[in-house]
Image: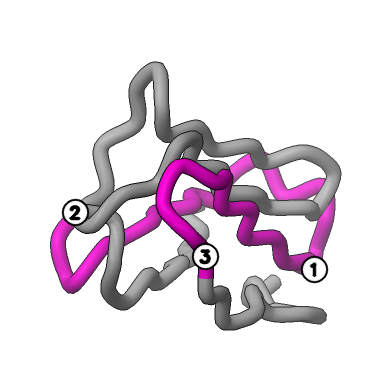
């Protein structure tokens, strides 16, 4: 199956120190070969204590705590499956 976005993350405008929550839904929800990659301004997004990702039953989430100026820009979620 080819991964397909059912819903896409919304555009957000946030104030400094608030939290960002991007969420989308994918099909198929149970593809164990699916790989989710997040990008910030075209570069792979590194996760850590402030930046977390979730992929569970077709729901994909990116959460960023205490946003600041370095977090502004364009975020992209790329989904691929590898047999």
Nearer to us in this view, 67 or 38:
67
Seen in the picture, residue 32 relative to 49 is either above or below; the reply is below
Question: Of helix, strand and loop, which one carries label 1?
Answer: strand
Image spot of residue 69 (x, y percent):
23, 57
Q: Residues within 10 Å of mark 2 (few under 14, many from 20)?
A: few
Mark 2 or 1, nearer chain start: 1
Q: Quadrant of residue 74?
A: bottom left
Q: Quadrant of residue 49?
A: top left
Seen in the picture, residue 2 relative to 38 is either above or below; the reply is below
Query: What residue would you read off at disc 2?
Result: 70
Distance of mark 3 from mark 2, alpha carbons?
Answer: 13 Å
Image spot of residue 40 (x, y percent):
26, 63
Q: Is residue 26 magenta?
A: yes
Image spot of residue 36 (x, y percent):
49, 52
The quadrant of the image that shows the N terminus is: bottom right
Residue at position x 67%, y 41% in the image:
55
Query: What residue would you read off at disc 1?
Result: 27
Q: How is the image coloured?
A: one colour
Residue 44 vs residue 81: left or right? Answer: left
Query: What residue would you read off at disc 3?
Result: 14
Seen in the picture, residue 42 relative to 61 is either above or below; the reply is below
Q: Is residue 53 magenta?
A: no
Nearer to us in this view, 35 or 33:
35
- Residue stretch rendered in magenta on the structure: 14-43
Distance of mark 3 from mark 1, alpha carbons?
Answer: 29 Å
Residue at position x 43%, y 68% in the image:
78
Q: Residues within 10 Å of mark 1 (few under 14, many from 20)?
A: some
Image spot of residue 14 (x, y percent):
52, 65
Nearer to us in this view, 17 or 40:
17
Residue 27 vs residue 47: left or right? Answer: right
């Amino acid at each position: 199956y080819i991964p397909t976005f059912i819903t896409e993350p919304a555009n957000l405008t946030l104030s400094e120190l608030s939290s960002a929550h991007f969420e989308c839904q994918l099909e198929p929800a149970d593809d164990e070969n699916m790989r989710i990659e997040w990008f910030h301004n075209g570069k792979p997004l590194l996760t850590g204590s402030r930046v977390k990702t979730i992929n569970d039953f077709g729901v994909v989430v990116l959460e960023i705590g205490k946003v600041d100026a370095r977090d502004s820009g364009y975020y992209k979620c790329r989904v691929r499956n590898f047999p």
